[in-house]
Image (cartoon, helix red, strand yellow):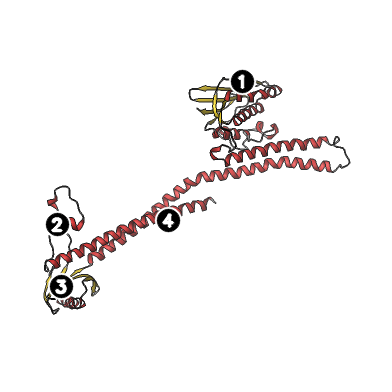
Amino acid sequence: MLKRLRLRFTLIILTLFLAVLGSTVVVLSIYIYRSTVTQTEMILAQTADGGGAAPQHMSSGEEDNALGAVHTRDESKFRDKPLYQLETVTFRYDSDGNITETIYSFPDEDSEAGEALLALAESLIAGGESGGKCSLGGSGYRFLLRGGSAGGVLVIGSRDNEIGTAGRLLLIDSIVLLGGAALLTLISALLSRWAVKPVGQAWERQKRFIADASHELKTPLTVISTNLELVMQNPSETVRSQSKWLGYIASESAQMKTLVGDLLYLARLDASEDGILPSSEIREFSLSDAVTDACLPFESVAFEAGASLECDIEPDIAMIGNENELHRLTAIFLDNAIKNTPRGGNIKISLTKRRNELRLECENTGETIAPEHLARIFERFYRADSSRDRNTGGYGLGLSIAHSIIASHKGRAEAASENGVTRFTAVFTI
């Protein structure tokens, strides 16, 4: 899938580039070619106006009109430059259309070519067209006919420069397009790899998420199915006599309900804009009160686990956000700490305000988490070690949900573990 996506990305970029570059090159080439044709026609007109004398020099005004040039300094340098080098042959003819004089702008040494050119001139004069293109012996020419009842002038000029310009433009266009396509193909391939990388990572996370969720759901379903079979094998037994199996079913059902609820919460959070649930009530509230309320139920839980719980909450700290989600964040931190603190260990949760930051920290004593595990601690279904498996009632989703809640409030999550103390911190900017 990712390969097809990269290929599609490359083709789209390449197509758009070639369309833009191709259009630009074609328009520019047409403009240059038309400029060449215009200059040729201008020389033919100047030659006809001069009675057959080819223009060798231009005045400043003529040059500006011909080329559209604007000289801002030392215009005298350009006044003696010829506009264009063009070989022309001028034929003067009388009222009967008979050619009376031939004027060459170049040395005439080929009598056969002169005779053929003369025949061409006679046919053009007889045709009466005022101008256009013609050919002779495989060579292209452009002509201009100026005349009336008393006779006139026919000027024929070579199109070699026009044809040469067209050929050079075609070669340059081909090189630019092919070179640009080759270069952009390489750049697009590199860009597509960079652009598709987040998609690939998300795809891998999704596959791992589905695999992990399937594995977690499989275990309670297996337990439920097995215990149901045991119950059904003894249909005459009372509920009380089979309470052991039914208790296992109830326990696994409750855990599976919690798991499904967490999965739905994460799915809704992922689907929402900016990671905030549409139903969330965003308002200003007392974060100090929310954290304190979340801590109270865990005092007895920590006592039963043989751990001490210390709450250091700075009073009168307010923030804008969803109070229920911040309450849940505190509960996740405390629940995770209690599950990973050995008997006789210590747990401390604190809320402080420093300048423009609010810091909610929860630390506990216990095993130090290795750096390679700490880097992935907020991933879904990730467990650092055996002390964080489902036997403790966890599925590896709590810290992932905590990370999503922190991110939805534009905060950042931090994790540190050293010297037997593990600390999770939520930092919010106010």
In the picture, the disc for residue 311 is 1
- Look at discs 3 and 2 and give the one toward the viewer: 3
Amino acid type indicated by mark 1:
Cys
State the mark number for residue 147. 3
**Above/below status of 175 relative to 114:** above
Along the viewing direction, whichever of 397 and 211 lies nearer the viewer: 397
Tell me where residue 376 sits by quadrant.
top right
The relative height of residue 26 versus residue 187 in the rendered view (above or below) is below
Determine contact: label 2, label 1, CB under 8 Å. no
The residue under label 2 is: 81
Which image quadrant for residue 386? top right
State which tag comes first along the sequence, 3 or 2: 2
Element carrying mark 2:
loop
Measure the C-alpha gap from mark 3 to mark 1. 109 Å
Spot occupied by residue 59 in the image (x, y as percentages of width and height):
12, 57
Q: Which residue type does callout 4 highlight?
A: Thr
Q: Distance of mark 1 from mark 4, alpha carbons? A: 62 Å
Task: Determine whether label 2 and label 4 are within 8 Å by CB.
Answer: no
Q: Nearer the viewer, residue 96 or 92?
A: 96
* Left or right placement of residue 89 versus residue 188 in this view: left
The residue that disc 4 covers is 15
Given residues 334 and 405, the one toward you in this image is 405
Question: Is any part of residue 418 visible from this angle?
Answer: no
